[in-house]
Amino acid sequence: MGEQPEPSGLTGLIPAFDARPTRRVWLVAAHGGAGCTTIRRSAMDFYADAGRALPLSVDPAEPSRIVLCAMCTGRGLESLRGLLAEWDAGRFGPTRLLGVAVTMPHARTPRQLRKGCLLVGSAAPALWRLPYIGGLDLDGFPDKYPAAYRRMTADLENL
């Protein structure tokens, strides 16, 4: 049997919380370790990190603008696929899905995972594939992020 929708008609895959309208774009993690904090740190004034929860705008006239985030792993892509199915079924409440950001877990991500990323991401309004950042686990966040992070922010600013 499939997941039953929450009584409110919202997704039951992640919790939801009331969010005040903001100009920032909310980053929503499809799973733990989805890369939201790394993306947020690339443009601190532009993004807000919702963690593994759905920010529901308290003002339906100004829906929360969200990007779903996932790591390009089997678990990450499956979690993302489930959330995209819920979004497609109308279970995201007063939000506006702008796209998905998928981060590569290794410098050389296997071809099957890269193809899976394209397949799952094709269900979203936009897909941003973000490269692996070497040294992140030991050296911390970089002073300068790869160009793909700046392109994602620029794309979102133009929406």
Image (cartoon, rainbow, N blue to C red):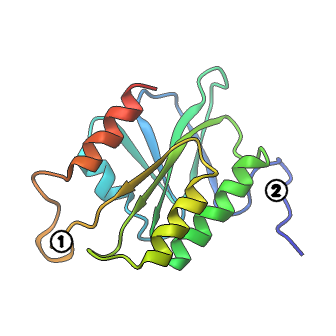
Q: Secondary structure at mark 2?
A: loop
Q: To which quarter of the image does residue 60 belong? A: top right
Going 27% across and 35% down the picture, which residue do you hit? Answer: 45
Relative placement, left or right, of 96 versus 4 is left
The reply to whether discs 2 and 1 touch (Cβ–Cβ < 8 Å) is no
- Give the number of callouts: 2
Q: Please say if 57 is above or below 112.
A: above
18 and 126: which is toward the camera: 126
Q: Position of residue 94 (x, y in %)?
A: 67, 34
Q: Position of residue 110 (x, y in %)?
A: 41, 79
Residue at mark 1: 134
Q: Please say if 115 is above or below 44.
A: below
60 and 145: which is toward the camera: 145
Relative placement, left or right, of 62 versus 71 is right
- Amino acid carrying label 2: it is Glu
Spatial CA distance of label 2 from label 1 is: 40 Å
Going 30% across and 40% down the picture, which residue do you hit? Answer: 151
Q: Earlier in the sequence, mark 2 or mark 1?
A: 2
On residue 6, which mark appears?
Answer: 2
Label 2 crowd bin: few (<14), some (14–19), many (20+), radius 10 Å: few
Q: Residue furthest top?
A: 61
Q: To which quarter of the image does residue 5 belong? A: bottom right
Label 1 crowd bin: few (<14), some (14–19), many (20+), radius 10 Å: some
Relative placement, left or right, of 62 versus 22 is right
Q: Position of residue 43 (x, y in %)?
A: 25, 42
